[in-house]
Structure formats: structure tokens, C-alpha cells
Amino acid sequence: MSEGKGAVRPAVSIVIPCYNVEAYLPEVLDSVLGQTLENIEAICVNDGSTDGTLDVIKSYAARDSRIVIIDKPNGGYGHSMNKGMDMATGEYIGIVESDDYILPTMYEKLYAAAEENNVDFVRSDFTKFKTGANGERVFWEEKLTPHSEYYNTVMNPADNLDVFNMQMLNWTGIYRTDFIREHNIRHHESPGASYQDNGFWFQTFCWAKRIYAVPEAFYCYRQDNAASSINQNNKVFCMPDEYAWIRDFLAAHPALEQRFIGVFHYKKMHNLNFAFSLLAPEFQMPFLERYAAEYREASAKGELDESLFWPEEWTAVNKIMADPQAYCAEYNFQIEKQAAYNKAQSGGSLALFRFHAKYDGLAETLKIVARRLGEDR
């Protein structure tokens, strides 16, 4: 949709990055074009797809003038998002991943909340879903934050660093376009689709002075697309590379660095832990060696703020810094132990006895048996 003479500026520009999603596109496009807020534009960014993705987009564009097509060689998720946001003409920018879909009132309600409260961005709860063995979808709702007091109120992240613990999902909200452009908020243009949403998310929270959360779920987040980056364990250093890029952003803005360096390392810890949990065993030690080296450096510079960490988190970070190999061995032992326990639970009392004898020792096993016998009386 152009902003030429007589044109009405869209309320929301929705950027939809697309790469080989022919099977999912009709559902997402139907959900975007079916919004009760009709004054929108849908910017579909085809990132060099090799299937029928572009044909699907073109077929929808032929029927609905609100679709804007960007067709480009493959450049990765960050590059696609930046191109789409650069093209946006709306008052606000939204994001919808091409294998998800949204409920009809999403942008009407988010736009109303943003306008009423004059905020830099507004976010909302969301729903996850999977397709069951019988072909029926299973849904479960997720809260943006467990803090009810964070909803329906204007907040400044600089005044309360705990709001950085809101779920890190950019597509649950809309962002004022002028805010994005004033601060040159970008996605990291690294290859592929690997955690580039982290950098965008962190920048928005650092720059924002007024944010708002809506306690209602509109976005439906697919959990069963095997091609999704969240389901790939071979992208060893993508997460630490993303946080190196965010660290450079902070270094370029000393005032933000001073205020947010502690929460940067805290959030980085959470996301490095997540990335580590996905790695195949042969990649674990190279990852942990880099993790340890970066946190030793941060500690030496006085950048770690213990008060932001839960005690067990602080203990784990210090174990990684002290001896990443020992941490890796303990981590894998606990994974093995949990898997063995789950298997033993389905095998009855004798299987549980053998499990405890193997992993806890005979003396501890006898204590567990005695305690359970006492509970059964």
C-alpha cells in the first residue's frame, strides 16, 4: 500500500518473512488478511524460497491489494526482517512468522492499546499449538509474564529491570514505526534463521520509555514444524554470536551500556543455556569453552550483577567459569539420570529400586524405601 496522494496510511504494517513455507502460507495469510482491523498492509518477504512460496504470495496479492511483495535472494531471517521493516508505511509494525497464524482481533486490540496509552510498543500473551497423532490440534496458552501487575499499565524498562524477564517473543506485539526508526533498531543480518530475534528484542527494551502488556492471547505459535530454527541443534555458535552483536550495540551507546550491562549478561546466560540444551554431545565442550571465557572476561570487568540471578543460576555460571568440562559432565549425568528415572517409573517398584541403587547408592536407596514404606502406612 503506497502513501501516495489520497492514500490512507495503514495502522499496522505486518512483516511476514517467508522461506520455503508453501504448506503453511495460506493459513497465515488468511489470518492476517482476516483481521478486524482492515487498515493494514502485509509485507511478505520471500527470502529466495525454492518451493512454491512465491507463487502462493502472488496468488494472494492478486486478490488483495494490501499485500506487498519483496522478492530477494536468500539472505537470512535478519536480512528479511530489516527489508520488510524498511518497506513498512504503517503507524506500527507487527511481525508474523510464516508457519504460525493469528486470531482476528489481534491488531485491532493491540493498536487500540498502543494509541490509548501512547507507548513505544505493546505486547500480549500467546498460544502454543501442536497437531496430535489424531490430526487434531492441541493448544495451550502462555503468559507474557507471571506478574499480573505488569499488565494494563505503562512501564519504563529502565526503571524496573525485571520486565526484561517477559517472554522474549517479538511477534506478540506491535512497535511504533517512528520509535524503531528513530533509534535505528535492526535485526542482526547473520546467515540463516538463528536467534536474530534476540538482538531486536533487546534493543527495543533498552530504548523504550513506555511499554504496555495486554493480558490476552492472540498469536498462535506452531510447535511442530521440524524446519524451525528452535528445532535444530547444529547451529553451535549462533547464540553467542548474536549476543556478541548485542554487546557491540551496547558498547556503541555508553549510557545504555551503563544501565543495562548487568541485565544483558543475565539474559545472555538464559539464552546460552537454552542453546546449550539443544546441542549434540560433540558440540557441547566447544560451546562451553567459549561460554566460560566470555563470562570470565565479564566478571573481570565487573559487569556481572549477582543480584539479578537466582542463587542456583549464579552457582551454575560460576561452575561454568571455573571448570566447563566438569559442568558438562555433571549436566549430562543429570540428563541421563532423569531419563533413567522416567523409564524406571513405568517399570514398577523393582525398577525404581534398581534405579536408586545405581544412581544414589545402596544406603540412600534403603532410606528412600523406608521413607516410602512409612508414607504408605
Image (cartoon, rainbow, N blue to C red):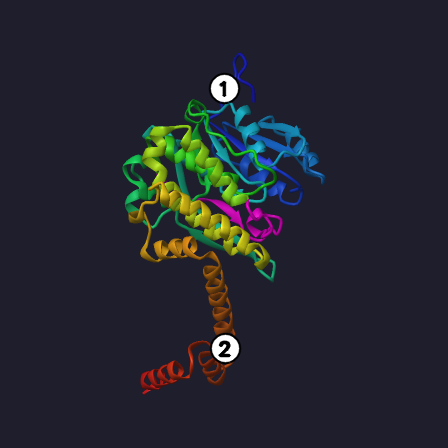
Question: Label 1's element?
Answer: loop
Residue at 32% across / 35% down in the picture? Answer: 259
Amino acid beneath label 2: Ala
Picture quadrant of residue 252: top left
Position of 71 relative to 25 (above/below): above
Residue 340 seen: yes
Q: Which residues are magenta?
A: 213-237
Residue at 61% across / 40% down in the picture? Answer: 192
Position of 142 relative to 208 (above/below): below
Amino acid beneath label 1: Val
**In the rendered structure, does residue 113 fall within the stretch colored magenta?**
no
Q: Quadrant of the N terminus?
A: top right
Residue in front for this viewpoint, 18 or 67? 18
Dot 1 surroundings within 10 Å: few (below 14), some, or many (20 or more)?
A: few
Residue at 50% across / 82% down in the picture? Answer: 351
From the top left corner, tell me how far across and down residue 165 is, in percent: 37, 46
**In the rendered structure, does residue 220 fall within the stretch colored magenta?**
yes
Picture quadrant of residue 99: top right
Mark 2 or 1, which is nearer the eye?
2
From the top left corner, tell me how far across and down residue 21 is, in percent: 64, 42
From the top left corner, tell me how far across and down residue 254 is, in percent: 36, 29
Task: Tell me which label, 2 or 1, sits earlier in the chain.
Answer: 1
Residue of label 2: 344
From the top left corner, tell me how far across and down residue 62 is, in percent: 66, 28
Question: Label 2's element?
Answer: helix
Q: In the rendering, which numbered label is found on residue 8?
A: 1
Q: CA distance from mark 2 to mark 1?
A: 64 Å
